[in-house]
Image (cartoon, rainbow, N blue to C red):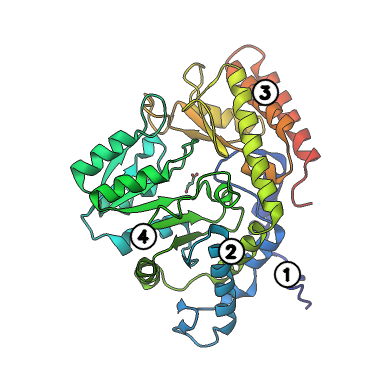
Amino acid sequence: MSFNGYFFEENKITDPEVFKAIKNELARQQNQIELIASENFASREVMAAQGCIMTNKYAEGYPGKRYYGGCSFMDIVENIAIERVCKLFNCKFANVQPHSGAQANLSVFYALMSPGDVFLGMGLDMGGHLTHGAAPTISGRWFRPISYGVGADGLIDYDNVQKLAQEHKPKIILAGASSYSRKIDFKRFREIADSVGAYLFVDIAHYAGLVVAGLYPSPIDYAHVVSSTTHKTLRGPRGGIVLTNSEAIAKKINSAVFPGVQGGPQMHSIAAKAVAFGEALRPEFKEYAKKVLENSIAMAERLQEHGLDLVSGKTECHMSVVDLTKLSINGKIAETELEEAGITCNKNTIPFDKLPPTQTSGIRIGAAAMTTRNLGTSEFKKIADMMYSVLSNYGKSGYNKLKSEVRADALELCKAYPLYK
Ligand code: DSN
């Protein structure tokens, strides 16, 4: 058996059913235009680290203070991940153990609130994330969320956030979103938080890669605590992180992540995070993030040239939410039809949506994944043309033929920009 630095080369998945599903998923990823704003394609090195022998080790605790023997290499890899992520985001303390963004957010709540405490978060129907207070989640059941949202212009209504803060005196004000395409004014959020003695907690899961590249505002100097995922624009493995500049908060977060919310850290994922943070520290990553933004804007503007509306009127990040109300197609059907045409995206509620979340009046699109495949602005404009063609012709005569043509174009584009070859 040889070892190439990450995994045993001879290792193959021989389980036929699992192998078949993985093989088919690889083909799907290779042959579809991936516009899901929260997805990306991790590098082979990131995936190799995630599939490595560190999966075998229990390392409850933190570097230097573990509850198991044999953790010396775990300490090395976790310390590398911490050092790199602190450098990336210019912060003093980091916890790299959360298994996901949801776990990271739950840990922050657990560290800074007690059950029944009030917090402010962006409503799910307005662009916020499930964990920002949606009713079926712990954030919505064990705490008392007050939702804020956007105005008729699609922009966060900061005056209303201030008013709600004054009225409800929250313990935490949570800024950050899953489908908000504009820059968030973190300074304003901090002023509001200070005016009522609340913690400012910012979730940058979507924007992290752009923050690292200086293309989206960094909340680090304003927030008491910041969370993120590592797999979206940051292009690492699936996982979460929590960052802060406060030693006192860092201690509370560490206790909240372990043993509060999680048991043993997934050390293979932490190894993969360390590799991804190393990649994000390189100058090429800034170039990548710059292209993500250019491509996102090019795609969004082209859709507008076709007459489609974007929630809030434009994008300032990797994603846009497209308002379909002018067309005779809802978000759910659009998601299915576009997938059949070779373009993957997701249905998305638009603010003040008249349709239920199972249907929606919008779709969310993002440029992070296809930019990893090296597509540029002209290709993203072409994708916008393809999308418009499907969306605007749905139900008209000759539609099925047109959809097949778009599928063929999508395949051609994917072949011209190969993935994992
Ligand atoms: N589910 C992710 C998204 O699509 O935005 C966030 O966790």
Report the residue marked by disc 3: 385
Amino acid type of disc 3?
Asp
Mark 4 or 3: in front is 4
Q: CA distance from mark 4 to mark 1?
A: 39 Å
Q: Tag on residue 108? A: 4
Q: Position of residue 369 (x, y in %)?
A: 64, 44
Amino acid type of disc 4?
Val
Are the residues flagged by discs 1 and 3 in contact, CB closer than 8 Å? no
The residue under the point 58% across, 63% down is 273
Mark 1 or 3: in front is 3
Point out the image quarter for the N terminus.
Answer: bottom right
Q: Position of residue 125 (x, y in %)?
A: 37, 35
First in sequence: mark 4 vs mark 3? 4
Task: Say what secondary structure mark 2 lies in.
Answer: helix
Q: Position of residue 271 (x, y in %)?
A: 60, 69
Report the residue marked by disc 1: 11
First in sequence: mark 4 vs mark 2? 4
Report the residue marked by disc 2: 273
Q: Badge 2 local density, few (<14 within 10 Å), some, or many (20+)?
A: many
